[in-house]
Image: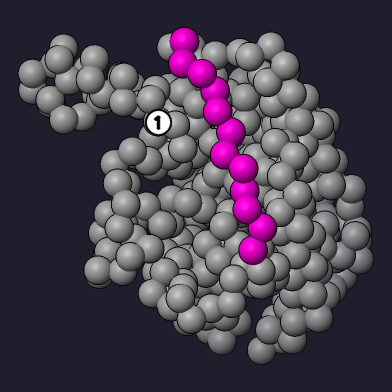
Amino acid sequence: MDNSATDTEFVVKATRTEQEPKSPGWRFYLRYLLAGVLFGIFLIKGEVVSWFRIQEMFRFQSFHMFGVIGSALVVGIVSVWLIRRFNIKTIDGDPITFTPKKFNKGQIYGGLIFGLGWGLTGACPGPLFAQVGMGFTVVLIVILSAIAGTWVYGKYRDRLPH
Amino acid sequence: MPEVLRQPWPWYVAGPLIGLTVPLLLLLGNKQFGISANFRHICASCFPSGIPFFKYDYRKEIWNLVFVAGIILGGIISSTVLADPAPVVVHPKLTQELAGYGITDFRSQIPVQLYSWENLFSASGLIMLIGGGFLVGFGTRYAGGCTSGHTIMGISTLQWPSLVATCCFMIGGIMMANLILPIILKL
């Protein structure tokens, strides 16, 4: 992955501020914080965080979630096409790059396992964090458990079929 | 806040806005949209335990942890200034099914009867919250992404492995919701 954007910012900030020479500084991260705030609001007001809507989706009782995912994809595909077609750069003028994903059996086995978890908790990773913000502090346990799951995967990765 | 903003947003408003997160992160700094990678970054920064999978420069990924902090903040804003006092409208068939398990509280988008500290130590609570969380963390990393990284970002960049992963997410979810969850909720 090309991280030149980060690296450039890193060097620039490092020379400017003497207190935190090794950190890109809070200003650099503020944009991602704001992007996260917006994404969190979209997830909640769009009811993507709703356990009920997820259950309706998996039971084919409501079009809502299919509409959300479908329209998000249309916008995503068109935006990425535009970025590539017109060679659009980042706001700092750096090139935008895409990393191709390689197929492996993990996408099937892991995908099925995550699907089972999604059907149980009614939340994928993004909504889990949004739910904590909504005041459901018990979801912190779900997140800790997800971190444990990731750790166990990392530990036994070599023994799993990929 | 205007009433329109407080009410649940229709899919044709929320969906496109979620889709715009993809170009937003690309334009802000050539960042690839994906949430589940943060579980790995947390492992790498807090519990690396000498595991090769957690040996990488997670500092380059701090932006993503900041993004997630933003999601939590967005949750606080949505449940205060943008809060909708009306109960969730759920499909009658699902309402009827859930009533059979004693789930009758539709005040929030999340069933408070299941998502509470009191319910955590019941059989169904342990399976749903701890078991479910584990499956989410293990499965997303095994698959190399979640609904954001594969379904939204992956398919937006026309990666066919992401389409395969998304189909598997759906198959797993359909199996859980229709075949296994009814048994768990009866416990």
Q: Element type at marker 1? A: loop
Q: Residue A129 placed where, x, y %?
A: 49, 49
Identify the residue at image location x=57%, y=80%. Answer: B127
Q: Residue B149 placed where, x, y %?
A: 60, 46
Which quadrant holds residue B7? Answer: top right
Where, quadrant-wise, is the N terminus of chain B in this rendering?
A: top right
Q: Which chain is mark 1 on?
A: A
Name the main secondary structure of what is drawn in magenta. Answer: loop
Residue labelled with disc 1: A3
Q: Is residue B132 above or below residue B7?
A: below
Nearer to us in this view, B41 or A1: A1
Residue B80 magenta-highlighted:
no
Residue type, mark 1 in image: Asn
Residue A95 magenta-highlighted:
yes
Q: Residue B73 placed where, x, y %?
A: 44, 36
**Which range is magenta?**
A93-104
